[in-house]
Image (tube, grey):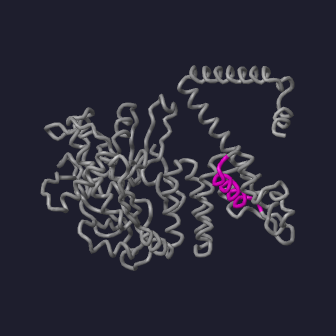
Amino acid sequence: MLTDSVQAAAPAGASRPGAMRSGADAGAAQADRVQADVEQMSDAGLVAATDTLGRLVRDAEALLARVAGEVARRSGVELGREGLAKRQGFATPTQLVAAATGGAVAGAARLVAVGRATASRVSLTGQRLPSKHPAVAEALTAGSISVDAAAAITAMLDRVALRADPVQAQAVEVILAGRAADLTFDRLLRVIREAEARLDQDGVELLEDQLRAERSLHIRQDGNGMVLLTARMDPETAAPVKTAIEAIVTGQIRARRATPDGELCAAPAVDDDRSIAQLQVDALAMIARHVLGCSGMPSAPAMAVIVRTDLDTLTTGLGHARIDGLDQPVSARTVRRLAAAAGLIPAVLGGQSLPLDLGRVARLFTWPQRLALGERDGGCASCGIDVAFTEAHHIRWWKQDAGPTNLDNGVLLCGPCHTRVHQDGWLIRVKDGQVWFIPPPHVDIEQKPRLGGKARFGLPKTDDTGSPPG
């Protein structure tokens, strides 16, 4: 039967083994021609092709999600064995979609969920109603967001639907649908977590309790003699561990590049070829040795857990906060508990601040200035990586341009982004507390400013992202 089906589906003249080999050879030759065409593309052509194909993939996924949602509707449990999926020999509509796409069941389930969440509805009177999530549905139809992004946004909104204010939830949906078009999926998940904490303040504590109950550490030895540590930590448990390890690693990376006068150079100044993963495990061992009584732990940058919250949350106990380097928001209860621990610096917005503009008095940005820049930029202002992997840099150089050590002349950048900005000729401007990157002409002939910092990678109070510098 299988042979008959293959032969029936094959093109005319392809049923003989020789013809099938000929077809395979033709396919291989065509693949070689396509590869040759791709290799001959210019850089601009390759980028354009990537953008175009990405759009095609999003369009196809959006249509597939619509179809999957309709398959699920016609396979409802109330239809029993008369449902579409069961009539086709599948137990569920998800299995039918997975078989059609050749993908994993999890991917098919995501298509079904997005299709159902973004489909228009019909009232009891037969009137056509808009989608439950119209902003996501519109962005999905327009091809500006992926099915993965749509699934993450709609799943979060459905989780908080019973407890969130409907008007606020609708506003957040619009913001997230817009942000999803400009952020990587991992960065979008960070914004979604912040949005969930904002919409469902009581849910932050409930999730914390659940995560804390699931914390664990397993230590075992494999057959090669390597010891394997597998840890699952809630944000409160992870914060000091992650902060301490990153502080030591950051200090050692700086030591590689430091010249005798304290300047940073591009080439390593210290012969240390360890990878980041090796530096991190060595830092963990160093901390353990120090706890056991070793006094030889090298100095590291200020080692502190930074918790960012607003004054109302700290005083009323309502709301949530963020720990630098961790995506999951924490409750006000956890902030108060952490406040009793050594090494905690609460970055309270709206409270009394330190004088942060030093002009030409000092060359290096101070620790309070780095805290303020971290609050404004949220991490690397260009790519959004965690604050721990960034350095404070002068926008107008200290020596060359006589740039002051002020917040409006400072920006947090990771090493790769700092190098790219200088080598490629990007300009940076700060306007109204927001960072803007102006691309060089060879990247964008119009040099249209691109928003950076927390205004791009975080969740704003409103959908207003500010206006670019003139």
Residue 203, how many percent across, how many down?
A: 51, 73
Q: Give the magenta-colored segment's residue range.
A: 103-120
In screen coordinates, is 6 left or right of 218?
Answer: right
Q: Residue at x 69, y 46 (%)?
A: 61
- The secondary structure making up most of the magenta span is helix
Q: Residue at x 78, y 56 (%)?
A: 90
Nearer to the camera, 366 or 280: 280
Q: Is residue 415 highlighted in magenta?
A: no
Residue 52, how many percent across, how many down?
A: 64, 35
Residue 298, how many percent across, how many down?
A: 16, 51
- For the N terminus, the quadrant is top right
Q: Residue at x 52, y 47 (%)?
A: 184
In screen coordinates, is 279 left or right of 434?
Answer: left
Nearer to the camera, 98 or 220: 220
Q: Residue at x 66, y 41 (%)?
A: 57
Q: Is residue 266 above or below residue 386?
A: above
Residue located farthest toward the bottom when viewing the structure as drawn = 316
Q: Is residue 414 above or below residue 324?
A: above
In screen coordinates, is 311 left or right of 287?
Answer: right
Nearer to the camera, 353 or 173: 173
Q: Quadrant of residue 310?
A: bottom left
Residue 302, how many percent across, how many down?
A: 22, 57
